Image (cartoon, rainbow, N blue to C red):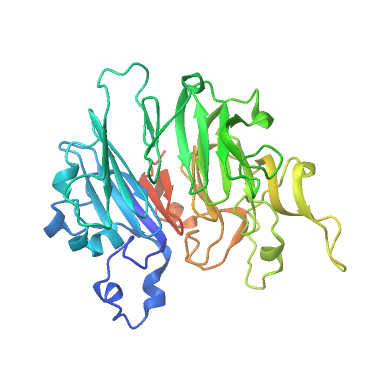
Amino acid sequence: MRWFGFGFNAFGQIYLNEKLIKGECSDAAKEVKVISPTELVAIHADRDECCLKAVCQIRASWSGRASLHLDGDSCVCLAGFLAANNESCGISVKDTRGCKDASISESYLTLAFPDRIESWHVQKEEKTPSWSMEIKTASPGPSLDLPLVPGGYIATKPPFYRSLSPHLKAKSLALSAEHAILLSESGVVYTWGLGSHGQLGHGGLSSEEEPRAVEALWGMPMSCVATGGWHSVCISDGGDLYVWGWNESGQLGLPSRGLRKAPQQQRSPQAGARCQDPCTSLAEEPQDGEKHEEVFISIQAFPALLDITPSCEIKTVSCGSRHTAAVTTTGDLYTWGWGNYGQLGHRSLSSSDEPQRVEFFREQQLSVVDVVCGAWNTFVAVVKEELA
């Protein structure tokens, strides 16, 4: 398996340029904005004793990337701002040996070991974790991925441990800076936190202090959830994609007034999306001279079914701050939303309010198997396409 990245690279999250880090690069804009998928290479191999040849998973924040190696003696390697400022960061690769999962934010790296959870402050020179918690090795039930832990979840800032009701039977959890979306074992979706942009999916803009089931999705079991800065998405058992929240940059794949009027916006004849239930949206009224048939979506307060053309089933999805990326069961990658740093992978800086296939991987005969979005960039796992 190989990993590629594109989008925001100011701190070397995708590839390292020492001159850029030191502010000596003559063409900084070209190095900061990686518009074409670029394969990830070894990260400080001489210093961290770690490379990407066996990386299995990627975790991303705005300024950094964590590469989780799960083969043999598992460990985590850091890239981006965290690696560039390695001298002021107390954690080393040796401290991560044996971890089974990891998550990363601007301030903390959280590591899950078989018997404990550790959170390290990555901007302080501390030789011990800022916080740790023992976990029972014989915990009943299926194994959990971060941020979920037995009995609750690990937040991105103190207090780190937050409890969850056992009645939720959480299967997976996605956290943004201000809201959360949880998937239960039975496929029910719960959300809570800030609701100012409709990102909770309850039909209004109110916030919720406790997990609340998204009633519009009742009766439709979901298999995957993801959250962006102010939007949320989920995938049904049948591979359908549902979106809700803020659509200012087209991150929902629904018509955005700003993008439709932008002169640099280019449309793809093969790309298309429509909202199946526009009456649940906070839509913008057409201005004088505009076609009255077109409805622009500013905030989608209820989940909307998003159709991708040509028709396909979605396998997994990830969200950046204002962009979305989805992998189909046939190994294609579709992206949409804000693209000012090239994070959509279409070899341009254009944004899009319609899902468009990233042609690079098909051209290279590569099949996409996973996608992980940072705030302003995208990381993609691929394998060689099997020829029939």
Q: Residue at x 33, y 66 (%)?
A: 11
Front-lying residue, 111 or 42: 111
Where is residue 145 shown, x and y percent of the image? 36, 33
Q: Quadrant of the C terminus?
A: top left
**Image quadrant where residue 279 sits:** top right
Where is residue 39 shown, x and y percent of the image? 32, 57
Q: How many marks?
A: 0
Residue at the front extreme, as displayed: 159
Where is residue 287 shown, x and y percent of the image? 84, 65
Left or right of 195, for residue 175 = left
* Residue 160 in the image: above or below residue 90: above
Left or right of 106, for residue 122 = left
Q: Residue at x 60, y 30 (%)?
A: 212
Q: Quadrant of the N terminus?
A: top left
Where is residue 343 shown, x and y percent of the image? 47, 60
Front-lying residue, 293 or 205: 205
* Residue 9 in the image: above or below residue 116: below
Left or right of 203, for residue 337 = left
Left or right of 218, for residue 296 = right
